[in-house]
Image (cartoon, rainbow, N blue to C red):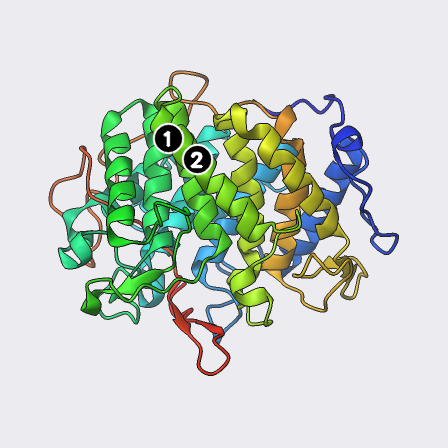
Amino acid sequence: MRPSLASGAIAATLLPSLISAQTPYSLDSTAAIKQTASTAVWDMLQYYHGNVTGATPGILPGPPPAGDYYWWEAGAMWGTLIDYWFLTGDSTYNQEIMTAMQFQVGPNQDYMPPNQTASLGNDDQGFWGMSAMLAAENKFPDPPSDKPGWLALAQGVWNTQASPDRHDETCGGGLRWQIPFANNGYNYKNSIANGCFFNIGARLARYTGNDSYAKSAEQTWDWMESVGFIDPNTYAIYDGAHVETNCTDINKAEFSYNNAVWTLGAAYMYNYTGGSDVWKTRLEKLVEHGLSQFFPQGIAVEPACETHDTCTTDMQSFKGYVHRWYATTTKMAPFIRNTILPVLQTSAAAAIKACSGGALGRQCGFVWTNGTYDGKIGVGEQMSVVAATSSLLIDQAPVPVTANAGGTSKGNINAGGNSDNLNRHETPITTGGRAGAGILTALILGSACGLFGWMSIGT
């Protein structure tokens, strides 16, 4: 079901007048929001060449040194475009999304393509899995009958990550960052990897009604608290730690996408459990901390790197995920709408003020608090503005569907059961597994200045 194009504007009544005269964009009405998001999408896709004859569908230029982007960010981009279609009704890029999402599924239909093995993290796979899950929930057009359904692809990712082969006793459980043992970062367990697994599990529980997914999500949360990656008092979510120290050398860098991926998963668990007090409290505390840490003036920032201008290409995409996942959180837990949406609206208004650069005079920068374009440019910057602007239409959007309430996506509970020998398991996982997931996030403390360096090998 698409959102109605005739719905009344929310921006005129909810958004503050923060639009700079320098930007060509406007958020003054529903029509203006859609036009702004549409133009930002077009500019974002100028970086994508997978639709050119002879090129590989689905990927962005890279990975380094061949180009700036690792495989995971393309998966995140297609998810952003699925949300864009869902919120605006613009189907212009649906065939591009379909082709990309199906081309990258890999031989076992679980988003483990062999040509990405050298940098394949649980997080990378998890981002593609979350985009597939989103396609099922948003009723994105189903693939042809001879192709795997969106639900089946999400299940394939979850099954491979729930496999005992992805887990060990170091740190008491949890997924490692990387999948192949030879990859740099295999000795690191982190919050984004486990967050993707938690997120997909919570959403599969709601979509399918299968409680085994929910039990696994609960176990993942418990492990995160036990190992110290989630602070039970502040609800800060720290980056990760190394297995050699039994995960005691916790890197306490906080990144917005860690907070956001866990917030959305908690919102789905709140919805699935019928509004349990436990998940309500967890969700409230995650949002409270997230708004304080990453929207200190009501505008999205990435404090771990933005202050010192050390954000990598990966990090320059994080603001978009916070906007998207916080917006969807309001559909899963409507009680928190009035806490979240005013902040997202203020942040989006600031974001478009950063869109006055590049050859077209409208490309978007990374820093949103300056009130002007900062000179940076790229997929992450554009994607974040697409997410921030289109997410303003969340009130007009229908609630994500389930298998019993409007969903049509074809599933396969045994998907991923023949995964490649990187982490082979003989029996498909159909009951709750232990914690896990994946996404590149290994950070190390810098030297004298105390700045953070991003270990982006394998994102």
Q: In percent of the image, x 24 and y 32: which residue is there?
A: 215
Of the residues shown, which amino acid type is indicated by label 2? Leu
Relative to 410, 169 lies left or right: left
In this rendering, the answer to whether 396 lies above or below 63 is: above
Q: Which dot marks residue 283?
A: 2
Dot 2 alpha-carbon crowd within 10 angstroms: few under 14, some 14 to 19, many 20 or more: many
Q: In percent of the image, x 29 and y 47: which residue is there?
A: 225
Q: Position of residue 130 (x, y in %)?
A: 42, 42
Q: Position of residue 342 (x, y in %)?
A: 67, 36
In this rendering, the answer to whether 316 lies above or below 395 is: below
In this rendering, the answer to whether 184 lies above or below 153 is: below
* In the foreground, 316 or 281: 281
Kindly give the residue lying farthest to the top in the view shown. Answer: 405
Q: Secondary structure at mark 1?
A: helix
Residue picked out by circle 1: 279
Of the residues shown, which amino acid type is indicated by label 1? Trp
In this rendering, the answer to whether 312 lies above or below 16 is: below
Q: Position of residue 40 (x, y in %)?
A: 70, 50
Q: Position of residue 55 (x, y in %)?
A: 52, 61
The quadrant where residue 249 appears: bottom left
Kindly give the residue lying farthest to the right in the view shown. Answer: 21
* In the foreground, 276 or 24: 276
Relative to 148, 59 lies left or right: right
